């Protein structure tokens, strides 16, 4: 697993292996994280989802021997969100007994999104990160709109498990958000039977570029509004990548392109990198 | 004047005063619309946002857009304005402005100094006319036309549009010389 969680493409490559193993009905699997050197927020939540799903079907061994990032993973609550049996070979007490510095001003640890209260907790964290770093309230509002829209979509539409983690990188003034679920995916939610990547692309374009919701009610500004907030004038730059269906999409301020065609597996994965100042 | 505090209307549904979940905010909206429906004609309501911690696009859609649409489509001569839109941690005015952009909806905010701010989808022309109405508190299309050096018929059309958006009040008054005219008033 060399740096497999540093980019959405590498995360996708890893997920393909995960779901291939599930399809093949393997009895056990070893995930070698010993040379893991860098992990993004989306990489973190994707790993949690992958391990949880593998654990449903086979014996999972997570190899962390020699991994340079164990303390960082522990600090982000990575191990806290894994099934307990995964950690039977490890003794993480030394990390749990450490005095933790308060990092709530720069990050939100991996948070499961199971209830409305979890979305509200995420919202509180976002405003804390922005106010404590003297960043614009406008930017905080934009980020809050993005994450609450996606968070409530996970609760009400995904039919799966979802997680979020957020980190502010002060040296580069970038905020990275990883938010993902292992549910039915956006394409399925828009009730399509299309299989070709071109058709799926058009469905995604409609979802992101037009005011439309899967809900019967007249409400729901949905993904279009999320896109608008992602490219607010208050941001210096935005890179937004999405994996759903059988494509990775590059979502732009006025369009949505296919970044890479891959294969279909459950879930929706958002990778945000926003330069805020 | 009936005061509506959007947050306190349904405290059992809003535990920490975030208005970010459509499922939580929609019932509040229904309750507010019920209160509006049962009120007398010419009632002016206001939302006090001092206790609102966060409101996102879904919350604005339910609590602002849909309530304004209800006022415009189903209620005669009932009005709504906002106070305390910005606090230490939140800039609700910016969020509402962003969400209302492109919707043809707008709201009036009464700021801490009693001044009117117009938020949402408002053209430059409408903004200039609204500034005059709220400065003068009570005026006619002819008066504004003279101030802005425009044709009275054109200003009358704009004022009618602003009245339909519930951004100004309108009453009909007889003229001394016979006939009637519309008089436009600020809603606070």
Image: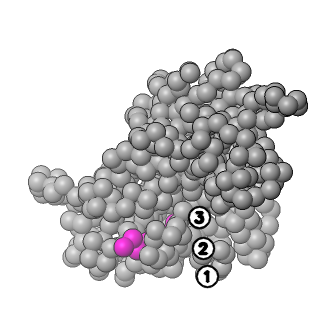
Q: Residues within 10 Å of mark 1 (few under 14, many from 20)?
A: few
* Disc 1: which residue: A260
Relative image position of residue B13 (x, y in whole percent): 50, 28
Q: Cα distance, mark 1 to mark 2? A: 19 Å
Which label number is shown at residue A228? 3
* Cβ atoms under marks 3 and 2 closer than 8 Å: no
Q: Is residue A249 magenta?
A: no
Q: Which mark is residue B39?
A: none
Mark 1 against mark 2, which lies toward the viewer?
2
CA separation in Å, label 1 and label 3: 23 Å
Q: Which residue is mark 2?
A: A253
Q: Is residue B181 visible?
A: yes
Give the residue displayed 20% in from the left and 65% down from the top. Answer: A71
Q: Is residue B53 left or right of residue A53?
A: left
Mark found first going from the N terminus, 1 or 3 = 3
Q: Position of residue B86 (x, y in %)?
A: 42, 46
> Are the numbered discs 1 and 3 placed on the same chain, yes or no?
yes
**Residue A22 position (above or below residue A246):** above
- Asked which quadrant contains residue A205, the reply is bottom right
Mark 2 neighbour class, 10 Å CA radius: few under 14, some 14 to 19, many 20 or more:
some
Residue at the outermost right position: B179
Looking at the picture, does residue B91 appear above or below residue B31?
A: below
Q: Foreground residue, B146 or A131?
A: B146
Q: Residue at x 43, y 51 (%)?
A: B91
Task: Quote the CA–CA distance across marks 3 and 2.
Answer: 7 Å
């Amino acid at each position: 697993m060399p740096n497999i969680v540093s980019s959405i493409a590498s995360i996708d490559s890893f997920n393909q292996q995960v779901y291939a193993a599930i399809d093949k009905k393997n009895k056990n699997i070893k995930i070698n994280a010993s040379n893991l050197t860098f992990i993004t927020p989306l990489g973190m939540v994707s790993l949690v989802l992958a391990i949880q799903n593998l654990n449903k079907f086979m014996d999972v061994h997570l190899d962390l021997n020699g991994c340079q990032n164990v303390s960082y993973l522990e600090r982000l609550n990575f191990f806290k969100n894994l099934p307990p049996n995964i950690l039977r070979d490890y003794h993480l007490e030394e990390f749990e007994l450490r005095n933790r510095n308060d990092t709530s001003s720069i990050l939100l640890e991996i948070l499961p999104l199971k209830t409305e209260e979890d979305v509200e907790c995420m919202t509180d964290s976002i405003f804390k990160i922005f106010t404590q770093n003297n960043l614009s309230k406008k930017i905080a509002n934009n980020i809050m709109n993005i994450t609450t829209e996606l968070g409530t979509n996970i609760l009400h539409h995904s039919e799966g498990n979802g997680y979020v983690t957020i980190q502010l990188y002060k040296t580069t003034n970038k905020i990275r958000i990883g938010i993902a679920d292992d549910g039915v995916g956006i394409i399925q939610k828009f009730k399509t039977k299309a299989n070709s990547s071109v058709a799926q692309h058009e469905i995604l374009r409609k979802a992101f570029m037009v005011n439309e919701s899967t809900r019967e009610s007249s409400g729901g500004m949905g993904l279009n509004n999320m896109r608008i907030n992602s490219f607010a004038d208050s941001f210096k730059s935005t890179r937004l990548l999405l994996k759903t269906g059988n494509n990775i999409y590059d979502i732009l301020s006025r369009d949505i392109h296919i970044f890479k065609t891959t294969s279909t597996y459950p879930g929706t994965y958002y990778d945000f990198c926003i330069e805020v100042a | 004047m009936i005061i509506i505090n959007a947050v306190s209307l349904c405290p059992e549904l809003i535990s920490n005063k975030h208005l970010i979940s459509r499922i939580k905010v929609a019932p509040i909206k229904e309750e507010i619309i019920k209160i509006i429906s049962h009120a007398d004609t010419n009632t002016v309501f206001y939302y006090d946002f001092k206790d609102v911690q966060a409101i996102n696009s879904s919350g604005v859609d339910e609590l602002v857009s849909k309530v304004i649409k209800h006022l415009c489509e189903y209620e005669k001569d009932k009005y709504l304005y906002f106070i305390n839109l910005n606090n230490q941690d939140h800039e609700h005015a910016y969020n509402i402005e962003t969400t209302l952009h492109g919707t043809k909806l707008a709201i009036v905010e009464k700021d801490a100094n009693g001044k009117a701010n117009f938020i949402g989808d408002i053209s430059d022309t409408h903004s200039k006319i609204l500034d005059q109405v709220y400065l003068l508190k009570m005026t006619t299309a002819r008066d504004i036309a003279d101030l802005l050096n425009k044709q009275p018929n054109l200003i009358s059309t704009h004022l009618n549009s602003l009245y339909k958006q519930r951004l100004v009040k309108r009453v009909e008054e007889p003229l001394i010389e016979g006939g009637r005219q519309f008089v436009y008033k600020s809603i606070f």
